[in-house]
Image: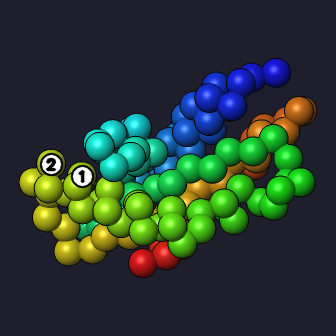
């Protein structure tokens, strides 16, 4: 059984592949600063997309996409501002997505992508 860190890394890899297959271009993964970490930063056309990835083995504590409370959303907004400043990026549109990855014991993982999950 994978550790929580290994499970999270696997989920982020699955999410990155899913997003790329959906036409997004991954710009950054696991970007860190003093305020925290952004899982995936991608470009979708003219939009910069900040993706929070949540991975679970089961839904006993709810679906993975439900695990981004208001405090986490505020932190992600701060991290997005820091990423934009560090990369001198200017995009007409910013979007915050949540990608839930449900890793099952048998069969492929189930991916749920909530575009514009919060603003």
Q: Residues within 10 Å of mark 1 (few under 14, many from 20)?
A: many
Kindly state the secondary structure of the residue where label 1 is placed.
helix
Residue wearing tag 2: 86
Horizontally, residue 64 falls left or right of residue 59, namely: left
What residue is drawn where x is 81% and y is 41%?
Answer: 57
Q: Residues within 10 Å of mark 2 (few under 14, many from 20)?
A: few
Residue 16, placed above or below residue 48: above
What residue is drawn where x is 54% and y is 72%?
Answer: 70
Residue wearing tag 1: 83
Which quadrant: the C terminus?
bottom left
- Inspect this view and state whether residue 45 appears: no
- Inspect this view and state whether residue 4 appears: yes
Residue 119, placed above or below residue 7: below
* Mark 1 → mark 2, Cα distance in angstroms: 5 Å
Kindly state the secondary structure of the residue where label 2 is placed.
helix
Q: Which residue occupies the foreground of this view, 6 or 41?
A: 6
């Amino acid at each position: 059984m994978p550790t929580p860190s290994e499970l999270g890394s696997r989920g982020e890899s699955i999410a990155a592949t899913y997003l790329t297959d959906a036409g997004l271009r991954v710009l950054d993964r696991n970007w860190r600063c003093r305020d925290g970490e952004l899982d995936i930063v991608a470009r979708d056309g003219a939009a910069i997309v900040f993706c929070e990835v949540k991975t679970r083995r089961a839904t006993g504590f709810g679906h993975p996409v439900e695990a981004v409370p208001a405090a986490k959303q505020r932190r992600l907004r701060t991290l997005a501002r820091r990423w934009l400043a560090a990369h001198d990026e200017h995009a007409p549109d910013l979007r915050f997505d949540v990608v839930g990855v449900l890793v099952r014991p048998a069969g492929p993982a189930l991916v749920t992508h909530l575009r514009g999950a919060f603003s």
